[in-house]
Amino acid sequence: MAKILVVEDESHMLQRIKIRLEANSYEVITASDGQEGLNKAREERPDLIILDIMLPKLDGYQVCRMLKFHKKYSKIPIIMLTALGQKDDREWGGKVNADMYMTKPFQAEELLEKIKSLIIKE
Amino acid sequence: MKNKNKTKKQLINELAGMHKRLVKYETSEADYKRRKKLIFDTNRRLQETTQELFMAKKELEEKNKELAQATEEWKTTFNSITDLVSTHDKDFKLVRVNKALAEAVKTKPEELIGKTCYQEIHGTKKPHPNCPHKLALETKKPVRAEFFDSHLGIYLEISVSPIFNDKDEVVATVHIVKDITDRKQVDKLKDEFISTVSHELRTPLASVREGISQILDELLGRINKKQKESLFISLEDIDRLNRIIESLLSISKIESGKVELRKRFYDINSLVQKTNSSLKAEAENKNIIIKSLFQTETLDIFIDKDKMVQVLTNLLHNAIKYTLREGKVKVEIKEEKKEIKIIVKDTGIGIAPQDFDKIFDRFQQIKRVSGPGARGVGLGLPIVKELVQMHKGRIWVESSLGKGSRFIFTIPKYTPDEALKEYLKDTSKSAIENPLQLSLLAIRVANYREIEEACGENAAKKILKEIKAAAQETIRSSDMVSPYRKGEVVVILAGPDKQAVSEIRERMKAMVREHLAGLEIKDIKIDVRFGIAVYLEGADTDIELVKWVEESLMAEKRVKSESKILIVDDEETIITTVERFLRDEGFQRLFEALDGEEAVEIAKQEIPDLIILDMKLPKMDGYEIIGRLKENVDTSDIPILILTGYPIENDKIKRYKKIENIPCLGKPVNFKALSRDIDDLLELKIA
């Protein structure tokens, strides 16, 4: 069973995503701030990370960058969740290298498809 | 009499002359009277002239006063302007400086006059390479630029206007520098507001939507039909709410000028196909068929992909919305001389001619169509119009009531040159806040012409298409891939540092290899070369950037004839063979060394661009030579290519291959491989 780490500070959203993923046979671990997300990513080595952008302590970009530029964790696919509607400049101007983006609100099927395609690649 | 134009002296001389003549002759009474009158007249005229002179003097004084007044007004105005204003002559010397400028540089205006602007204002010994004054002198046109002065920590806008003499030469320029930090601050606040609202509205909406969706999908237990229907309606309402938020955010971004297009080359045909399929479900609900008509298989146009999707989605959504059951919607793409035309046709209720313009106005809903999800907030078309116009295109509608409508918009065509220039212009603008490093990767199919001749133009074009696709997969959204000259694809990377650029280059090579692996073209091996150029200074103006791109791409030819290569081998025959080969390839500056000592000496002296090194040498072997070269700071960066008779599997050499990244070739020399490796190593140093 594939393990997915969800990093999201809005507890409602976090709950929803957890339910959805578990219903689709994924094991879910959660974190509610950037630092916790980073720690759990390193400890648990999930098969995929769903990472919100607006997070306390460390924001999503920072977490993503730190994981992607470390040889050990760079292969973990990351889907970034954004409420900004369109790709924010920082995402690209910086060296973030997330694998995919999803905007909120999203269609569950789309998210599930993206997860499937990224986990297969590995 | 012409007394007016005569001076006092002249008049006196005249009088004296007359007196002389008077005295000369004997006079009669009549004569005497006549002469007396003459003197009287002359006297009167003299008085008049004096009067006139007096008036003229007064006028002159008046004018002088006015002039002094005007100068005083002008000077006061000049010195009251809070912007920094100055006039510079052709030699960069300051002619006039206002108080604001003098104060900004912490001195008095008098201290600056006659001195060079770059010294006094910028504190440099030479003018800046992108100095707008220089540019204005050269182009004879006004120049405007924005920049961030890190010294003072403020944003400035500079406006330079040339001053011409009557021979139409530029003799000086006027500079006006404005502090725009406030404006930038407001911009930033607007940005943050939009982001915050965006986030705060969308997050709870996302949670609610997912919650309802999960119940509907029965993830939380079974539900009955009625419950399902009710929840389905709620879901639709949420999506409607989301669309309204989208359009409000869209329009407010456009309003505040926050929307910037990120244009790249995209295949518009595939975008249309994607949009069509995303709206298929909605159309099928009403038994409407969506069709598309393209002239060619693919059509690359220079557009902002996300905005174009927004435009197409909007127009298609409208077409479906305003077409009653069982209708047809068709998207057609036509290529014309200077533009691309996209037509969205429907067999819907149509629009009355008097409303043709109104429909593009904000918050207008011309005809209320009943049915679920039909109401909107009236922003769709205004947004579409803005986005099309931002692309420098036009949009209009042709329609008749009851017969359907055709929405037509145009997008101008861009040549790769024009597209690159625009991209660089936009990049240099955003580079103002972050000093941006630009890197250029040129991917060239070296035997493009061969392939064209052997397998036809289409096959060759296909190769380029795959290379483009491979490059596009490797880059990020701030970068750009563009076709350039024949058989060439240019990639501009905005932002990554030197190391990241090398990594991207390697990734791209692998990606290109992968893509081309699928294409087996007759028996010709596709020879792809990669060249890098890195622009080290911060990007200042787009003109400089374009020059740099062109120069970098021209660099290859220069590189070969100017590159210095040192060949180190104890066997003369090897040296001769390699040299002959190198000369054939276009290399002219070749050096040779027969042993280690000589090699290190020449390396230190000439600092070659490449060293081809044999490993087995008398006195000092290859490893020692490499060691010595790496020790010396002048020679440590010289790329080395090992050409050795030793079996390459030898452990020591393997170590070099891995750690030092020194390519290794065996003897006898495989010239094709040698050529590739040399090209590789040298192209790393185009910058």
Image (spheres, grey):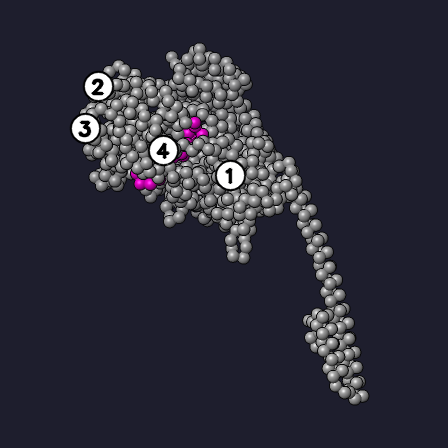
Horizontal relation, residue B57 to residue B629: left or right: right
Task: Report the residue marked by disc 3.
Answer: B573
The local secondary structure at tag 2 comes to: loop
- Where residue B456 sits: x, y (%)? 23, 40
Looking at the rendering, in which quadrant would you find the N terminus of chain B? bottom right
- Report how far apart the C-alphas of labels 1 and 2 lie in the structure: 54 Å
- Residue in the foreground of this view, choosing between B438 and A21: B438
Chain part drawn in magenta: B476-497
Q: Residue at x 29, y 34 (%)?
A: B589
Q: Does the magenta-highlighted stretch encompass residue B484?
A: yes
Q: Is residue B86 above or below residue A35?
A: below
Horizontal relation, residue B601 to residue B162: left or right: left
Q: Earlier in the sequence, mark 3 or mark 1?
A: 1
Q: Which mark is residue B126?
A: 1
- Report how far apart the C-alphas of labels 4 and 2 lie in the structure: 31 Å
Q: Residues within 10 Å of mark 2 (few under 14, many from 20)?
A: some
Labels 2 and 3 within one chain:
yes
Q: Chain of mark 2?
A: B
Q: Residue at x 34, y 42 (%)?
A: B294
Instruction: Tell me the mark number nearer the camera, choosing from 1 and 4.
Output: 1
Q: Chain of mark 1?
A: B
Q: Earlier in the sequence, mark 1 or mark 2?
A: 1
Task: Report the residue marked by disc 4.
Answer: B686
Identify the amino acid type marked 1.
Lys
The quarter holding residue B483 reads top left
Identify the amino acid type marked 3.
Thr
Identify the amino acid type marked 2.
Tyr
Q: Earlier in the sequence, mark 1 or mark 4?
A: 1
Labels 1 and 4 within one chain:
yes
Task: Report the residue marked by disc 2.
Answer: B646
